[in-house]
Image: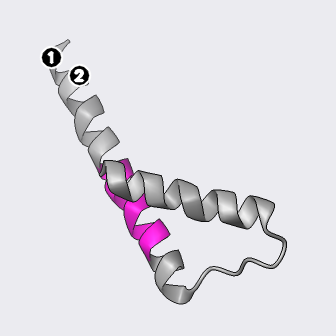
Amino acid sequence: MGKKIAQARKVREDSDYDDEFEPTDEQTKMQIETARELIKLVEEYLEKIWESN
């Protein structure tokens, strides 16, 4: 997951600082997939915390 987050950050920074940057369809799909995976991991983590309390 760390590598995916690092790649997502690079794409975001490229889009922030390069006026002519346009992500490819593949980059966009990867960003969305990474976000979904991260959300799932956070939800699972929070469920564990809530269950233990």
Q: Which residue is mark 2?
A: 49
What residue is rendered at 48% in x and 67% in y? 31
Tell me if label 2 and label 1 are in contact, CB under 8 Å: yes
Name the residue nearer the viewer: 25 or 50: 25
Magenta span includes 15? no
What residue is rendered at 76% in x and 60% in y? 16
What residue is rendered at 55% in x and 54% in y? 9
Please provide percent x and percent y for residue 5. Answer: 42, 52
Name the residue nearer the viewer: 29 or 48: 29
User: Disc 2 versus disc 1: distance between alpha carbons?
Assistant: 5 Å
Q: Amino acid at mark 2?
A: Ile
**In the displayed structure, would residue 13 be above or below residue 25?**
above
Please provide percent x and percent y for residue 20. Answer: 81, 79
Q: Which residues fall within the magenta stretch? A: 30-40
Please provide percent x and percent y for residue 3. Answer: 34, 54
Q: Is residue 42 left or right of residue 52?
A: right
Asked which colour scheme the image uses, the reply is: one colour
- For the image, the number of numbered tags is 2
Q: Which residue is mark 1?
A: 52
